[in-house]
Amino acid sequence: MNHDLTIGKPSSTLFKFTFPMFVSVIFQQLYNIADSAIAGKFAGESALAAIVASYPITMIFMAVATGSNVGCTVVLSQFFGAKNLKKFKTAASTAIIYGAVLSLTLTFIAVLLC
């Protein structure tokens, strides 16, 4: 299904666009809370300390990934708004490949830090 976000009331379109991202942030925070609660109760203080110590690194990686994706969407939005679908498809495939390479790079860095 292809839905043109440039048509319609801006507030409802923006809400429909941002709601899934908002839900994903809530689930990420719930995951961190559950992880801390389970590790603190069953694995002990050392495990909880490791989770707390690694959280800022995780957030830095998420910020890098999110920032990169926002940058890609700016380019994609410009091509889509200009109705230049050939450049849009090229930029979209490049963004997907870049996302995969970035994911592998961040994973490799995380492994080195451990």
Image (spheres, rainbow, N blue to C red):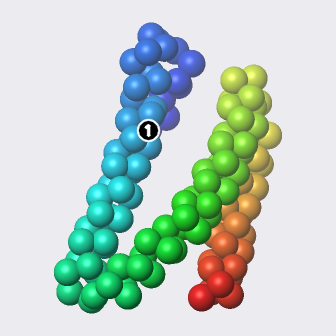
Q: Residue at x 44, y 21 (%)?
A: 13
Q: Is residue 2 left or right of residue 20?
A: right
* Total marks placed: 1
**Does residue 42 lie above or below 56 as drawn?**
below
SS type, badge 1:
loop
Residue 57 horizontal/vertical position (percent): 58, 68
Disc 1 residue type (three-letter): Met
Quarter occupied by the C terminus: bottom right
Residue closer to the observer: 94 or 52: 52
Residue 73 horizontal/vertical position (percent): 67, 40
**What residue is shown with label 1?**
1
Residue closer to the observer: 20 or 109: 109
Residue closer to the observer: 3 or 111: 111
Residue lying at the far top in this picture: please name it: 9
Residue 89 horizontal/vertical position (percent): 71, 45
Q: Residue at x 28, y 87 (%)?
A: 44
Q: Residue at x 29, y 63 (%)?
A: 33
Q: Residue 12's image quarter?
A: top left
